[in-house]
């Protein structure tokens, strides 16, 4: 969330900059690459812009904040190139790299702010806070000598206070409902892992489910360890790989993941650009499912590295793709670091799936229209009706082994289309989420009741009787001044119960518990189970070795 807020701030800040500053600082940006260009027209343009800068330096009536206008100018320059070449400030870059590197230094808690108070909703297993004795339901009152409640606190403020260098100590004062005074903890910050593996479990006999949220440095080892752990308890010969909502990450990790499913030396992806010669990436010998049934789940948010994996699986007729058309990002970015800790993430090449298709959707009408594409797909009916999807026949390709038709320039089309359930757009349901009512109810439910932390997963699952928990949640929502329309409640009840139960179990037992519950309400997941159990792969021309 913080990363999104920072990126949005950069965009809003850009809009406030004067266009003259853009032209002036643009000259600096281009002048730095002058020595690489022998083109006469480029030289003339650079000289022209350099003169404008000189005039500013010599004659402008006031001082100039060069750091601010340089950042704004670089953002605008890159915006003119393509939608995915971007400038990242030092703060945004650090947050982005934390996620991909899979580690940061902190105290190991998850929290949310409710009524100006920081509530801890979970603690990292084996992390500094859990080892110190902090637990879900605690309120953070002070961090060091800083007051951590009131109108002035926000997520950035709390995050900066809790993060720091490894082994640095931080004092945290906690209020716990069952204790009549504040509890002081001195916690030594440590490395906290950010897992890209949300869930890995046996979904049905012989079927493993894997969900990853991005393609990070440690993704493959996390998956391998997860599969090894569950295989010690129960074997499997089929995998559901869930890439819904996964916006990508490292290209190398995508190649390594696809390699786990494809035969040795099969092409996974190749990249090529004006200044980057063709580079082929092929599968290696080792892998955890070179044979067996494979399903890949996708949706409209599935992008970039996720599309590389889905495209390779589809092009080699190795597995079935289930869900909705992916985002359509087929451009490769490379970071170039600047002297103030910021970076330019520059598009250097296109990537192509094994059949030769580039799935990058058009951005001919500019970045603004490009980023509106998902909303337009929804308005056009594409999320609910496959026939609403119009793909250009001139951009059709054939899969390698079975000669099936696939398309380029617009994402990966699924083999089995699953419509989006529009009941999830129910206004009451969205209001419950926008008010963070599911997490708030969890705190309300367990607050001061230590017994909840002694229950096993199965015990807790059996306690969450549908009718009882829904009525209690409804009463709580009314108490929190949420107006309940019973017709809207009835329409959304399935999703309210799903999310309520999932959130409660996630906060008590982790993300695997969340997906074990949530998946059983999702059509994409249930269809995957059906296809695997019925062995319907041959209907779709999918080849796998039994």
Image: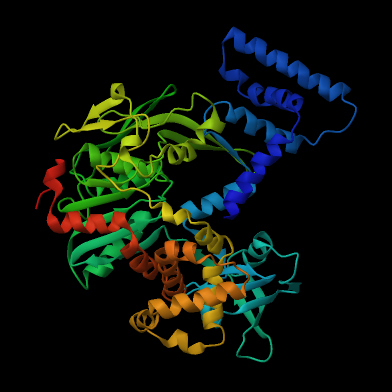
Residue 135 in sight from this viewpoint: no
Name the residue furthest right: 61
Residue at 70% x, 13% y is 47
Q: Is residue 227 left or right of residue 277?
A: left
Res 267 quadrant in image: top left
| Snapshot quadrant of residue 206 | bottom left
535 relative position to 426: left or right: left
Which quarter of the image is occupied by the N terminus? Answer: bottom right
User: How many numbered tags mark residues here?
Assistant: 0
In the rendered image, residue 438, in percent from the top left (x then y), is placed at 51, 69
Can residue 524 be seen from the camera position used here?
yes
| Viewer-proximal residue among 239 and 26 | 239
Front residue of this view, candidates 89 and 209: 209
Residue 361 position, x and y percent, is: 42, 31
In the picture provided, is 63 more to the left or to the right than 248? right
Can you name the residue that lies furthest to the front here? Answer: 487
Which residue is at 76% across, 24% downward? Answer: 20
Q: Position of residue 345 (x, y in %)?
A: 53, 37
User: Can you tell which quarter of the image residue 175 is in?
Assistant: bottom right
């Amino acid at each position: 969330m913080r990363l999104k807020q920072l990126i949005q701030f950069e965009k809003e800040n850009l809009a406030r900059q004067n266009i003259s500053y853009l032209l002036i600082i643009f000259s600096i940006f281009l002048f730095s690459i002058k020595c690489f260009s022998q083109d006469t027209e480029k030289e003339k343009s650079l000289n022209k812009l350099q003169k404008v800068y000189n005039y500013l330096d010599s004659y402008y009536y006031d001082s100039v904040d060069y750091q601010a206008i340089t950042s704004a100018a670089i953002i605008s320059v890159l915006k003119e190139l393509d939608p995915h070449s971007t400038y990242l400030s030092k703060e945004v870059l650090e947050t982005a790299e934390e996620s991909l590197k899979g580690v940061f230094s902190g105290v190991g808690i998850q929290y949310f702010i409710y009524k100006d108070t920081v509530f801890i909703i979970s603690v990292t297993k084996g992390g500094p806070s859990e080892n110190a004795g902090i637990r879900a339901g605690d309120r953070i009152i002070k961090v060091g000598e800083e007051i951590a409640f009131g109108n002035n606190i926000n997520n950035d403020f709390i995050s900066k206070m809790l993060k720091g260098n490894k082994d640095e100590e931080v004092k945290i004062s906690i209020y716990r409902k069952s204790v009549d005074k504040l509890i002081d903890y001195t916690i030594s910050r440590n490395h906290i892992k950010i897992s890209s593996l949300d869930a890995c479990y046996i979904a049905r006999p012989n079927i493993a489910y894997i969900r990853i949220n991005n393609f990070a440095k440690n993704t493959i080892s996390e998956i391998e360890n997860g599969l090894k752990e569950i295989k010690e308890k129960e074997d499997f010969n089929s995998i559901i790989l869930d890439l819904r909502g996964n916006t990508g990450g490292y290209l190398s990790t995508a190649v390594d993941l696809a390699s786990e499913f494809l035969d040795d030396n099969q092409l996974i992806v190749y990249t090529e650009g004006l200044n980057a010669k063709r580079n082929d990436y092929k599968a290696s010998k080792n892998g955890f499912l070179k044979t067996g049934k494979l399903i890949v789940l996708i949706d409209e948010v599935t992008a970039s590295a996720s599309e590389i994996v889905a495209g390779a699986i589809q092009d080699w007729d190795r597995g079935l793709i289930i869900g909705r058309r992916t985002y359509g990002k087929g451009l490769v970015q490379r970071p170039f670091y600047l002297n103030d800790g910021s970076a330019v993430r520059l598009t250097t090449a296109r990537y192509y799936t094994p059949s030769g298709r580039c799935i990058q959707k058009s951005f001919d009408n500019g970045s603004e229209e490009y980023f509106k594409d998902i909303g337009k797909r929804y308005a056009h009916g594409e999320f609910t009706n496959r026939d609403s999807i119009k793909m250009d026949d001139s951009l059709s390709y054939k899969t390698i082994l079975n000669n099936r038709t696939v398309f380029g320039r617009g994402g990966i089309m699924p083999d089995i289309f699953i419509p989006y359930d529009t009941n999830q757009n129910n206004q009451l349901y969205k209001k419950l989420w926008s008010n963070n009512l599911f997490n708030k109810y969890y705190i309300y439910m367990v607050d001061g009741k230590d017994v909840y932390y002694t229950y096993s997963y199965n015990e807790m699952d059996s306690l969450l009787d549908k009718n009882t928990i829904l009525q209690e949640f409804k009463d709580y929502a009314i108490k929190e001044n949420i107006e309940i329309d019973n017709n809207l409640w009835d329409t959304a009840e399935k999703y309210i119960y799903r999310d309520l139960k999932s959130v409660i179990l996630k906060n008590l037992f982790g993300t695997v518990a969340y997906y074990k519950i949530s998946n059983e309400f999702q059509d994409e997941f249930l269809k995957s189970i059906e296809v695997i159990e019925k062995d319907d792969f041959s209907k779709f021309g999918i080849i796998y070795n039994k």
